Image (cartoon, rainbow, N blue to C red):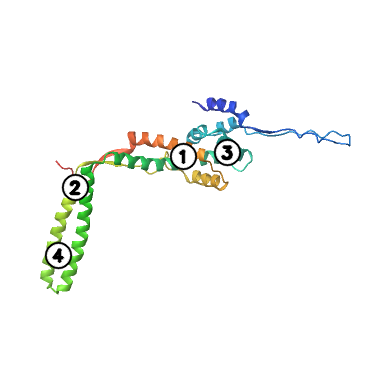
Amino acid sequence: MGISDVSASLFQATAAASVQAKPAAAKAGATDGAAPAASSKTDKVDLSDLASALKGDALDLFTNLSADDRTSLGKLVSSGALSADELNDALSSALKSERKKAFWQTAREDADAGRTLEGDARQQKMQSITQRMFSETETRRAAMVESGMSMEDRMAAMSQLADDMRALQDTYDQLAGIGKPMTAYTLKGGDTRFFATSKEDAAGQKLADLGFHSGSFDKALSTLAKGFAQKYVNEEGKTEITLGPAIK
């Protein structure tokens, strides 16, 4: 859908979103013979013009908001509290920040879905080996100092300790899958789909400082971000990597 199409669609909703004050009614029982002055004030937010000023992520988010949220944001612009450009940056910042959260949540869920009882048991064994390596190293080094052994014997004991730790490390690496392909989830630093510019972040902070908050806004934001993150994980955010030399 092009901006012109969005503008046309939103223009039809303008009448419902606009707030128009009725002329003040004449007071009953007036005796001065003078008719009350007629007054009419229109507080109208032209959402079609605002939508036309937005682009990219900001426009995508704006068109998915409720009529009330669009009107509230439009009033901030029409009142001069926020420029259309600042609103564009603020909406972009909000969507990008939510996408990062949704990506890592999706990655965790995707990884958890592949967990098995065998995998959980392997994780427990790895934790046990890590604890043993720390405790063995501390205990045996302390024993070397307290026993008052000669430098020659201490060097031999240190060499034996290194061999034992190396054996434990090899066992740990095998359990961890070192040298075997595994799934990794990554976000590339600087990817403008997830990382906002300083200008966008500043605009987002300004919108927050103005006190704008809406549960329906948060819901629309979350829905868009989750959909994007799921697609990204499936297409780009999940890769196969090998830690250490490949096992042949």
Quickly name the residue at label 2. 175
Sequence-wise, the earlier of marks 2 and 1 is 1
Q: Given this view, does label 4 or label 3 mark the residue nearer the observer?
A: 3
Question: Quick one: SS at disc 4?
Answer: helix
Using the image, determine if residue 96 lies above or below residue 133: above
Q: Secondary structure at mark 1?
A: helix
Residue 73 badge: 3
Q: What is the C-alpha distance between the residues marked 4 and 1?
A: 55 Å
The reply to whether the C-beta atoms of the residues labelled 3 and 2 are less than 8 Å apart is no
Nearer to us in this view, 76 or 156: 76
Dot 4 and dot 3 residues touching (CB under 8 Å): no
Q: Whole-percent x and y of residue 201?
A: 49, 45
Task: Give me the C-alpha separation between circle 2 and circle 1.
Answer: 39 Å
Q: Horizontal and vertical percent for residue 123?
A: 23, 48
Q: Is residue 179 left or right of residue 81?
A: left
- Please name the residue that numbered disc 1 is placed on: 95
Residue 52: which quarter of the image? top right
Q: Amino acid at mark 3?
A: Leu
Q: Are marks 2 and 1 in contact (CB under 8 Å)?
A: no
Disc on the earlier residue, 3 or 2: 3
Query: What residue is shown with label 4?
Result: 158
* Residue found 22% across the figure and 50% down from its top: 124
